[in-house]
């Protein structure tokens, strides 16, 4: 199983249009520091499952039948933008799994074209997707948001990965499930730096590094186990903080970059090295 960060930016991306902060200036000059819409891909054999679809040129990135399905965390524009053009394609239906939020983007669902929207109604109910080898199990878990939002716990053999990108004030039931399920890796959103770094920012809605550390501590208290954490959905304020404080991150928290890949094929038990490549 391979897990690729196709994009790691928040809704504004990096560089932010018109911003002249140090992080945005760096990303404008050095494209390896740029961050596109937060999107990821799971690969098992030749089976490919996309997580979110915010890239506007999604149909140009993937040829027909290259994707086997898409998971949507929620139905806001920044996560479905790439589907607006893709739906008018021709060929086999493409399954799109996610919460059915009747208040968000009903036009896309009603005029879906070749997209086959499959509503995941029940939290914690496993869904099996069959590959050539072992089945890939996807478990939707509820997250706190004004919109119906799922996180996804992805299970392949003995490996567990949790993709949670609206993780501020994680619901107790979800935290309790994670403590039993015990992911080796959590992917968490982190748009903002610690509050003390920039007190002027609004930390009431979006996740900050403080929130990530608190969540990981709460998880470890309940589960009595450790997990490695990768940060995605990163904003330019967080990147500016990292330019000055990268050495202050806890050892088990890693900052993902666009197109970086976790190669998990050789991971059989927790404790074995994970190869991280670009």
Image (tube, rainbow, N blue to C red):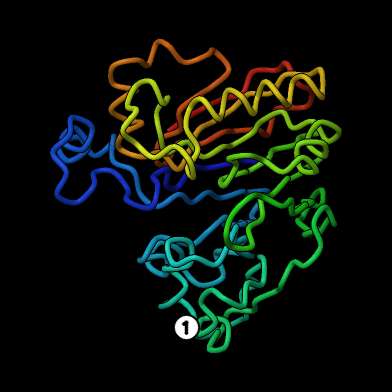
Residue 21 in the image, given as x and y percentages of width and height: 17, 34
Residue 3 in the image, given as x and y percentages of width and height: 58, 41
Q: Is residue 111 above or below residue 211?
A: below
What residue is rendered at 48% in x and 61% in y?
79
In the image, 45 versus 146, the foreground residue is 146
> Element at badge 1?
loop
Q: Is residue 144 left or right of residue 182?
A: left
Residue 29 in the image, given as x and y percentages of width and height: 15, 37
What residue is rendered at 73% in x and 26% in y?
219
What residue is rendered at 42% in x and 43% in y?
8
In the image, 235 versus 204, the foreground residue is 204
Q: Is residue 64 left or right of residue 42?
A: left
Q: Is residue 256 left or right of residue 199?
A: right
The residue tagged 1 is: 89
Q: Where's the C terminus, which quadrant?
A: top left
Residue 85 in the image, given as x and y percentages of width and height: 41, 78
In the image, 143 versus 263, the foreground residue is 143
């Amino acid at each position: 199983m391979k897990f690729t960060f196709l994009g790691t930016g928040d809704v504004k991306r990096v560089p932010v249009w018109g911003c002249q902060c140090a992080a945005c200036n760096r990303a404008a000059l050095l494209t390896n520091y740029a961050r596109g819409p937060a999107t990821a891909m799971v690969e098992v054999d030749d089976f490919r499952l996309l997580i979110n679809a915010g890239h506007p040129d999604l149909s140009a990135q993937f040829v027909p039948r290259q994707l086997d399905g898409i998971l949507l965390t929620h139905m806001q524009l920044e996560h479905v933008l790439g589907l607006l053009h893709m739906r008018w394609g021709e060929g086999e239906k493409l399954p799109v799994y996610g919460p059915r939020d009747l208040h968000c983007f009903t036009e896309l669902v009603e005029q879906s074209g070749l997209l086959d929207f499959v509503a995941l109604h029940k939290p914690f109910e496993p869904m099996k997707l069959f590959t050539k080898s072992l089945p890939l199990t996807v478990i939707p878990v509820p997250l706190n948001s004004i919109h119906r939002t799922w996180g996804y716990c992805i299970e392949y053999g003995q490996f567990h990965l949790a993709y949670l990108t609206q993780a501020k004030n994680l619901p107790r039931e979800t935290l309790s499930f994670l403590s039993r399920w015990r992911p080796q890796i959590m992917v968490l959103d982190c748009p903002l730096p610690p509050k003390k770094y920039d007190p002027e920012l609004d930390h009431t809605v979006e996740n900050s590094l403080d929130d990530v550390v608190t969540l990981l501590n709460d998880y470890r208290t309940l589960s009595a186990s450790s997990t490695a954490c990768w940060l995605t959905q990163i904003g330019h304020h967080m990147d500016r903080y990292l330019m000055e404080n990268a050495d202050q991150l806890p050892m088990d928290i890693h900052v993902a970059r666009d197109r970086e890949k976790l190669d998990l094929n050789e991971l059989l038990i927790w404790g074995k090295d994970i190869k991280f490549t670009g």
